[in-house]
Image (cartoon, grey):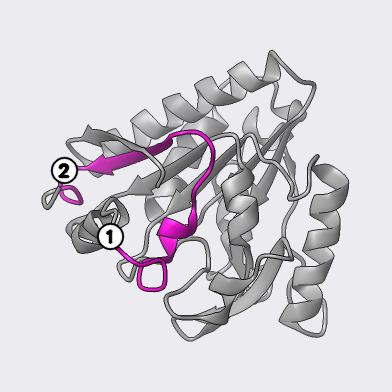
């Protein structure tokens, strides 16, 4: 079972600032070793604050490939779109706008399955490895224990021979990276905030917890997982 390192922040805003600093450092360190860096980001309100902070940081963004860990199968201009959130935060101003954003194709294709396959093809072209290896993956943690769009007790948890799959969560069709891709990342970071996440966070770090009930436990990279949490989310640990 993977080791988790937990760093606590007093507030959600402090958490966002801490996360932005760590991500910035990780990107800079990776750029010292390779020409391009691949990063997968998550949706959510707290990550949005992180991306707004990052967008103003003066690093070689033109050498950074940005992907999403998952996406809702909605039109690109939908307020439910994670891609729209990325465009309104990280890509909204320079220098962050110079990064290369690879969004999921969604409703321009006929089905979520077609979208998942198209994105898998893109990953195979843009990333090295099989499964594709990201330098950094930022993940959230749902109240129900889901991460990316891997939801409890769904077939998506069992997909190990593809890099993307479709699923349904909270009433919406979704496309998501699969567990093998999440596990192949060089670094994985969870961002967890708010009192509603207390039980999910406690279950995540519990070695006896099942992956079916808490799919976030499927994420088992070789390196230690960093969990950034605020005090409200961490009261039970």
Question: Between tags 2 and 1, which lies in front?
Answer: 1
Percent from the top left, x then y, of residue 212?
A: 41, 73
In this figure, which residue is indicated by the disc labeled 2? 231
Given residues 184 and 48, the one toward you in this image is 184
Percent from the top left, x then y, of residue 175?
A: 64, 70
Is residue 60 something one can see in this rendering?
Answer: yes
Find residue 178 and name its label: none
In this figure, which residue is indicated by the disc labeled 1? 208
Residue 223 covered by magenta stretch: yes
- Residue 61 falls in image quadrant: top right
Q: Give the CA separation, mark 2 to mark 1.
A: 24 Å
Judge the density around disc 2: few (<14), some (14-19), many (≥20) Cα neighbours within 10 Å. Answer: many
- Residue 142 falls in image quadrant: bottom left
Q: Main secondary structure of the magenta part?
A: loop
Determine whether 4 is above or below 159 in the image.
above
Residue 222 covered by magenta stretch: yes
Determine whether 18 is above or below 166 in the image.
above
Instruction: Please report the residue visible at 49 percent of the width from the left and 48 percent of the height from the top.
Output: 220
Given residues 92 and 212, the one toward you in this image is 212
29 left or right of 188 in image: right
Q: Which residues are magenta?
A: 209-234
Given residues 219 and 113, the one toward you in this image is 219
129 left or right of 234 in image: right
Judged from this view, the residue extending furthest toward the top is 32
């Amino acid at each position: 079972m993977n080791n988790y390192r937990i760093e606590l922040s007093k507030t959600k805003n402090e958490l966002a600032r801490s996360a932005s600093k760590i991500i910035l450092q990780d990107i800079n360190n990776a750029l010292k070793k390779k020409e391009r860096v691949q990063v997968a980001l998550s949706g959510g309100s707290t990550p949005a604050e992180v991306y707004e902070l990052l967008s103003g940081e003066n690093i070689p963004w033109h050498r950074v490939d940005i992907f999403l860990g998952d996406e809702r199968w909605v039109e690109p201009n939908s307020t439910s779109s994670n891609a729209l959130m990325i465009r309104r935060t990280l890509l909204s101003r320079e220098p962050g706008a110079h990064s290369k954003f690879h969004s999921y194709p969604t409703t321009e294709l006929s089905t979520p399955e077609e979208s998942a396959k198209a994105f898998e093809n893109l990953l195979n072209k843009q990333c090295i490895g099989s499964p594709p290896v990201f330098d950094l993956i930022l993940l959230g943690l749902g109240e129900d224990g889901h991460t990316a769009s891997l939801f409890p007790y769904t077939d998506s948890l069992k997909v190990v021979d593809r890099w993307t799959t479709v699923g349904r969560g909270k009433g919406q069709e979704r496309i998501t990276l699969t567990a093998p891709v999440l596990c192949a990342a060089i670094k994985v970071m969870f961002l967890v905030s708010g009192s509603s996440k207390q039980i999910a966070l406690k279950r995540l770090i519990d070695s006896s917890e099942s992956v079916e009930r808490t799919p976030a436990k499927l994420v088992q990279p070789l390196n230690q997982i960093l969990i950034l949490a605020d005090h409200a989310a961490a009261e039970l640990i």
